[in-house]
Image: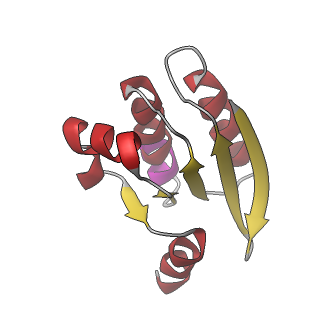
């Protein structure tokens, strides 16, 4: 798994490439934590290039979202499809995490709030 940090219209974006599972979900948590330490509380996690994510990966995203909400921020997810979308649906997390079809759409939703 690889995590690319970038910024889109001043919003931090984490592009995740590869599978996210019990063995590497901690890297996603650390990437989110490093952004929070910079006092940035709106984050987009792009899963467009993630072919598989287990429940520990989704749990990491939910934990990150709740941490950001403490600072009146939010975590938004983009690029959810295939088996990742199935796991979101099966775990019921699609109702907890804010999912957008693209990074641009997620950025727009931050700007509207």
How far from the left and from the top, in percent, is residue 72?
A: 48, 60
The residues colored magenta run 66-70
Query: In the picture provided, is 29 more to the left or to the right than 91?
Result: right
Q: Is residue 96 above or below residue 63?
A: below
Q: Is residue 20 above or below residue 108?
A: above
Query: In the picture provided, is 47 more to the left or to the right than 69?
Result: right
How far from the left and from the top, in percent, is residue 24?
A: 61, 20
For residue 37, which quarter of the picture? top right
How far from the left and from the top, in percent, is residue 50?
A: 55, 41
The residue sitting at the top extreme is: 23
How far from the left and from the top, in percent, is residue 23?
A: 57, 14
Residue drawn at x 71%, y 47% as measured from the top left: 35
Query: In the picture provided, is 98 more to the left or to the right than 9?
Result: left
Q: Main secondary structure of the magenta part?
A: helix
The residue sitting at the bottom extreme is: 112
For residue 26, which quarter of the picture? top right
Which colour scheme appears in the figure? secondary structure
Q: 82 or 88, which is in the foreground?
A: 82
Residue drawn at x 66%, y 37% as measured from the top left: 33
Residue drawn at x 50%, y 58% as measured from the top left: 79
Q: How many marks?
A: 0
User: In what quadrant of the picture does the N terminus appear?
Assistant: top right
Q: 20 or 98, which is in the foreground?
A: 20
């Amino acid at each position: 798994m690889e995590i690319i940090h970038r910024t889109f219209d001043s919003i931090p974006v984490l592009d995740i490439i590869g599978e996210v599972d019990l063995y590497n979900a901690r890297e996603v948590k650390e990437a989110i934590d490093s952004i929070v330490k910079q006092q940035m509380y709106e984050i987009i996690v792009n899963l467009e290039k993630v072919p598989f994510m287990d429940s520990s990966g989704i749990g990491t995203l939910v934990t990150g979202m709740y941490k950001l909400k403490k600072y009146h921020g939010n975590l938004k997810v983009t690029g959810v499809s295939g088996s990742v979308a199935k796991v979101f649906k099966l775990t019921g997390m699609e109702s907890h995490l804010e999912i957008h079809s693209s990074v641009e759409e997620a950025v727009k939703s931050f700007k509207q709030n």
